[in-house]
Amino acid sequence: MAAFPAVKTFEEYDFTFATGAPQKQLQSLRSLSFIERNENIVLLGPSGVGKTHLAIAMGYEAVRAGIKVRFTTAADLLLQLSTAQRQGRYKTTLQRGVMAPACSSLMK
């Protein structure tokens, strides 16, 4: 299942941490309508407010809906792209792994 580090759900999320975004707005992400609209989601905030939890929860909902999901951290993605660039595979790696038509949860 998408190699999530743990299963996180919207039901388990503590919305008191998300002071910058209304709970209704965060709950609307659960519908995954942003995927149908080909929109990106960017989660910003200090450490410990639940960005990773929300990203995994969105990915988990997508998996449950039959959508392919790729989970990676920003650090791992940069390492993969840097390695691919040195090996002359940057464009292929970017197209296959980053721009693939699937829900990608990108973290940290």
Image (tube, rainbow, N blue to C red):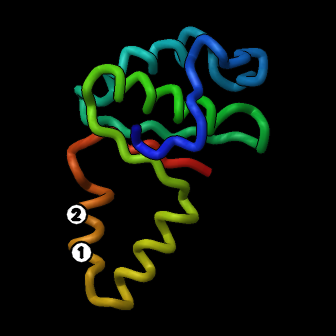
Q: Quadrant of the N terminus?
A: top left
Is disc 2 surrounded by few (<14), some (14 to 19) or many (20+) residues within 10 Å?
few
Q: How many marks?
A: 2
Q: Residue at x 77, y 23 (%)?
A: 17
Near-viewer residue (6 or 27): 6
- Residue type pointed to by label 2: Gln
SS type, badge 2: helix
The percent coordinates of residue 63 (x first, y second) are 35, 28
Residue 87 spot, x, y in % from top left: 33, 90
Q: Secondary structure at mark 1?
A: helix
Write the residue at 23% across / 26% down.
36
Residue drawn at (43%, 72%), measured in percent from left and top? 80
Left or right of residue 91: residue 7: right
Q: Residue at x 21, y 72 (%)?
A: 92
Disc marking residue 11: none
Lateral position of residue 54 relative to residue 66, left or right: right
Q: Residue 75: x and y, percent?
A: 57, 64
What x and y, as percent, mark residue 23?
A: 62, 12
**Inter-mark Cα distance, 2 to 1:** 6 Å
The crowd level at tag 1 (other Cα within 10 Å; few <14, some 14-19, many 20+) is: few
Eyeballing the image, is 94 above or below 103?
below
Looking at the image, do the residues carrying marks 2 and 1 touch, with CB atoms under 8 Å apart? yes
Q: Is residue 13 left or right of residue 100?
A: right
Q: Quadrant of residue 88?
A: bottom left
In this figure, which residue is indicated by the disc labeled 1? 91
Q: Does residue 31 appear to the left or right of 88 in the view shown?
A: right
Q: Which mark is residue 95?
A: 2
Question: In the picture, residue 98 is in which quadrant?
Answer: bottom left
Q: Which amino acid type is marked by label 1?
A: Lys
- In this view of the protein, which residue sits in the foreground, 66 or 29? 66
